[in-house]
Amino acid sequence: MIKNIIFDFGDVFINLDKSALNRHLSKLKISELDDLTLRKHKDYEMGLISTEEFINYHLKTFPQLTKTNFVKAWNSILKNFPKERLEFLKGIEESGKYKLFLLSNTNDLHIKWVKDNVYFYEVFKSCFREFYLSFEINLRKPNEDIFQFVLQQNDLKPEETLFIDDTLKHINTAKSLDIKTWHLQVGNEDVKELLSKKEFEF
């Protein structure tokens, strides 16, 4: 029986355009990001470097960037948050049947954008018992330790816990810990369909 539900954020609730950053950078004559730059992206997502350090690294590495056009490119991945997904979430939360958690790989710039552009962000956040953002807890999916952290911090049993994410690597780690999973297929499924999924015991 499912008692706990852990949700991803991007492409589960808020829609993303995951290729947008590369498209924006290519217009600025940056065709490929090297391994060090990609490592900086992961470090930033884990809160290991500050926003100022992150931006300054890119400005020094790519002289054609300005703070304004880089931040615009960085945030271009973020699209809209359909209000009906919030209403679905509120319905689950108000039922009192499940403990709800959010577990997202994200960063300070993205969350600032969401706070500025999604007017119901605080209502959304209030639906969860815990709201885990990778840059705030210094852990990141698909690493096993982030899942163990959530389980241990909240005394959750894996077999009573469902994890919903659109990224297969994240799903596979959760499965390895005996957490039940839904690998949401973006474009073909919507989180609002959750309670109609017959493979889970709700």
Image: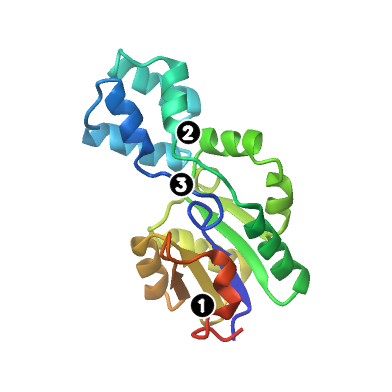
Q: Position of residue 18 (x, y in %)?
A: 38, 44
Q: CA distance from mark 2 to mark 1?
A: 34 Å
180 and 176: which is toward the camera = 180
Q: CA distance from mark 1 to mark 3?
A: 28 Å
Which numbered circle lies on residue 16?
3
Q: Quadrant of the C terminus?
A: bottom right
Instruction: Give the class, few, some or many, for how many residues have Cα within 10 Å of label 1's Cα (few <14, many ≥20).
Output: many
Q: Which residue is mark 1?
A: 158
Q: Position of residue 59 (x, y in %)?
A: 36, 17
Q: Quadrant of the N terminus?
A: bottom right
Q: Residue at x 50, y 49 (%)?
A: 15
In the displayed structure, 34 sits above or below 144; it is above
Q: Position of residue 167 (x, y in %)?
A: 38, 60
Q: Nearer the viewer, mark 1 or mark 3?
A: 3
Q: Mark 3: which amino acid?
A: Leu
Which tag, 1 or 3, sits closer to the chain's start? 3
Instruction: Give the class, few, some or many, for how many residues have Cα within 10 Å of label 2's Cα (few <14, many ≥20).
Output: some
192 and 112: which is toward the camera = 192
Q: Mark 1: which amino acid?
A: Pro
Under circle 1, the secondary element is helix
Quadrant housing residue 100: bottom right
Q: Mark 2: which amino acid?
A: Asn
14 and 3: which is toward the camera = 14
Instruction: Give the class, few, some or many, for how many residues have Cα within 10 Å of label 3's Cα (few <14, many ≥20).
Output: some
Q: Residue at x 37, y 74 (%)?
A: 176
